[in-house]
Amino acid sequence: MIFRKKIIQDDATLEPKSEQKFTGLMGISSIFRNHSNETNLDTKIDRPLIEGSILMPESDLPKASTSKSIRLIQEVRKLEDRTIKPFVDYNEGRLFYPILSKIGEVQDNIEYLDSLVTDGILEQKIYEKLIVCPIHPDTFSSSVRLYCPDCHSMNVEKLKLFEHKKCGYITESTNFDFSDHNDSHCPSCKKPIKNFEKEIRVPAMWYQCNDCSEKFDNAVIKLHCRKHEHDFDTNSGQFVTTFSYKLKNSEISINSDISQIKDELLNLLQGFNFTAKLNVSIKGKSGNVHEIPIYGKSKTTNDSILIFIKNQPDGIDQSDMNSILVPKLDINPTNTLLVTISDINEGVDSLAKHYGIHLISEHDFSKIVSRVEEFVSEWYLENGAKK
Ligand SMILES: [Zn+2]
Ligand SMILES: [Zn+2]
Ligand SMILES: [Zn+2]
């Protein structure tokens, strides 16, 4: 429980919980107009959704949930089989996905993972079926116990017969000494046994009770509820299904290459005499702070550029544009770029044009870089000519 509290606190400091999205474009620019004219905005607001996002103290404006998802994708790519596996706290009866803490989410936010399944980013798979106590189903911790059917002692041992295939010698497993894998010998023919699997057959197996010496084929199997210390019948147990989440091999997985493309764009801007930074917080005219993936400021002129990177398996839509529009209008840079490997949905193009956002959509990262280069060099030359 302490564990969980701590995570929530960390989470709170990492980033605001709300991820509100704009539902429409109407009035975004007018909000900023209002903003500059009005000192006390709190009294003047009549559009709760938009306001909530903009006026929330210390909040970054509506933040595309993609940035968090992309961070998660980057983390998942590092994992074996690109799969997020659950971690079960058997004592507390809780299910965690520790990777979530790396992106500032609480570790048991399964809804968030499920939302990525809905978005087509992750694929849900059954990880295991846990048998839980029917009386205490919130306790995941159960173990198997074997009992002697006669005296109900747990002091039961497994016995096997081993047969040396080569000579046909059969004896109880206790007579074969396999403790030294490289130097085992058949007790009968004394020939070396190099490959247990191949050379030894197990014709029979049974149990023996060490307390009453009874031999039996099937021990009584019970499940033991470890937290509440009682046995329950295997058939009475309930199932709890746990899930793992595998990164889909779709276009979205390329998103993790974003960190690389960011670095390349950063170098590119620096090559054109910009002071360029990644993931910077920029304060706009409204006083709100915006997180910008790439921000560049010319060392020689007053020019500045914002570069946004977004990828959506279903294409860039208006809500993606809206999340860019807010910082763009508030910071008012000389140029704003949106680069993406996704397709651009209908209507987004004209929207971008209308607000002076330059769209670059290419399915290939290197093409994106070269098109940004084209754009910046043209702009750079223009500036040089003006001087
Ligand atoms: Zn129980
Ligand atoms: Zn017994
Ligand atoms: Zn032998």
Image (spheres, rainbow, N blue to C red):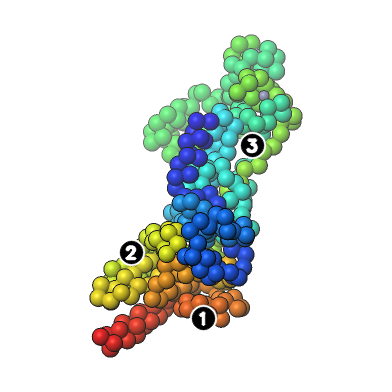
Q: Position of residue 63 (x, y in %)?
A: 51, 59
Q: Quadrant of residue 304?
A: bottom left
Judge whether residue 40 can be spotted in this image. yes
Above/below status of 94 relative to 11: above
Mark 1 or mark 3: name the one nearer the start of the chain: 3
Q: Secondary structure at mark 3?
A: strand
Structural crowding at the residue carrying mark 1, measured as other residues with C-alpha within 10 Å and reported as few (<14), some (14–19) or many (≥20): few
> Measuring 38% from the left and 66% from the top, which residue is drawn there?
294
In the rendered image, residue 21, in percent from the top left (x then y), is placed at 58, 61
Mark 1–mark 3 CB contact (< 8 Å): no
- Disc 1 on helix, strand or loop? helix
The answer to which of marks 1 and 2 sits earlier in the sequence is 2
How far apart marks 3 and 2 lie (CA) works out to 48 Å
| Residue found at x 64% / y 37% | 130
Q: Work out whether residue 137 or residue 193 is closer to the camera in this orientation and state it.
A: 137
- Residue occupying image coordinates x 33% and y 64%: 277
Label 2 element class: strand
What residue is pinned by disc 3?
130
**Residue nearer the viewer, 103 or 257:** 103
Query: What residue sits right under mark 1 in the picture?
Result: 353
Q: Is residue 301 left or right of residue 194?
A: left
Image quadrant occupied by the C terminus: bottom left
Please give the residue where the numbered disc 2 appears in the rendered image.
277
- Nearer to us of marks 1 and 2 is 1
Instruction: Name the residue type under label 2.
Output: Lys
